Image (cartoon, rainbow, N blue to C red):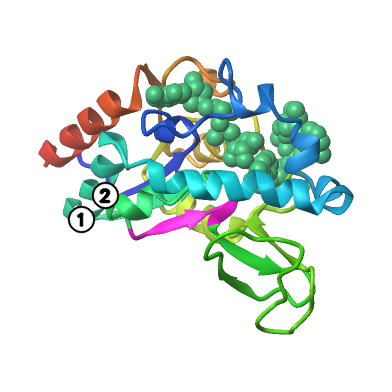
Amino acid sequence: MRPSSILILTGAGISAESGVETFRDKGGIWSRVKLEDVATPEGFARDPAMVHAFYNARRAGLSTVEPNAAHHALAKLERLHEGAVTLVTQNIDDLHERAGSRNIVHMHGELTKAFCAACGAHSVAAGDLSVDLTCAACGHAGSMRPDVVWFGEGPYHMDDIYKRLMIADLFVSIGTSGAVYPAAGLVAEARAAGIRTLELNLEPSDGTPLFDEARHGRASVLVPEFVAKILTQS
Ligand code: NAD
Ligand code: APR
């Protein structure tokens, strides 16, 4: 029977076929860059210019990539499925938006946004961020940072995510290694609530044993197949 409410979690793997690097695959970002240097508040305090350069390069890279069939299939599901479809992503790219998804929760923030560490104002990051920028809201100099949640910082919107998960009757995890909490803990929360769980990933992840069903292969193949099956169910 067609599920009435679906909560979908995505990770870097859904963007891999668009040419966006993942983190823990062979040759992934963390095999080249120390996450302590670019994805922790301590790293930013130590060398803000280097952290800005890391995210400025990733933000510039967004203009060279396009959503793939997996992103488009999820946008189609949101458009055509009468029930609720919530998309929770760990990704900081904007590929889900560019594919047409609207009901998106970015739990690790967004590369296209910035925020002021002095006053907390969020803004669009139009172009490169740097230590020379002043905050348009409070005028403070040097406090603009990428609007990205770093290790050790609380993710965004967790209360909302848990509320939406608890009313779902299907939880689908796509393209994530299940290495980082609290995203990696959602499958256990779903199981405890009696919610059906499905993993679509290139290979078994840390969380695979917890899923009712796991299909392994490329997201650009598995996700359109999953969406087509849901939309043909009555
Ligand atoms: P975690 O303990 O699940 O981290 C998973 C892995 O990341 C660890 O096994 C370790 O290899 C590495 N790691 C974690 N914290 C580190 C640190 N301070 N220095 C070096 N390596 C570290 O994750 P966590 O530390 O409990 O962080 C979870 C919080 O961080 C969550 O709120 C999550 O939303 C956020 N987060 C954000 C990002 C991001 O880049 N946007 C990445 C991961 C976690
Ligand atoms: N199709 C489906 N899955 C894929 C594909 C693909 N084409 N390519 C890779 N994958 C899978 C890999 O098998 C892996 O399990 O995607 C997963 C990517 O895992 P990670 O690189 O760990 O990325 P993610 O799970 O999103 O990392 C979680 O850690 O460092 C932080 O902020 C970062 O949000 C990220 C978080």
Image position of 48 (left or right of 1):
right
| Crowd band around label 2 with a 10 angstrom C-alpha radius: few (<14), some (14–19), many (20+) | many
Tell me: is circle 1 under 8 Å from ligand 2.
no
Above or below: residue 152 compared with residue 32: below
Give x and y (percent) for residue 26.
57, 15
SS category of the residue bearing label 1: helix
Three-letter amino acid code of the residue under disc 2: Ala
Q: Residue furthest bottom?
A: 138
Give percent across and percent down for residue 33.
Answer: 71, 30
Where is residue 160? Give x, y as percent: 54, 61
Element on which disc 2 rests: helix
Q: Is residue 179 left or right of residue 76?
A: right
Q: Quadrant of residue 141?
A: bottom right
Which residue position is annotated with label 2? 75
Determine which of the numbered discs, if any, sits on residue 159 in the image.
Answer: none
Q: Amino acid at mark 1?
A: Arg
The outermost residue toward the front is 132
Which residue is found at the position 46% from the left and 15% from the top?
203
Residue at the spot 54% in from the left edge and 55% down from the top edge? 110
In the rendered view, would you say 89 is above or below 70? below
Label 1 with label 2: CB-CB less than 8 Å: yes
Chief SS of the magenta region: strand
| Observer-nearest of 230 and 19 | 19
Query: Mark 1 — residue?
Result: 79
Residue 93 on the magenta span: no
Q: Which residues are magenta?
A: 102-111
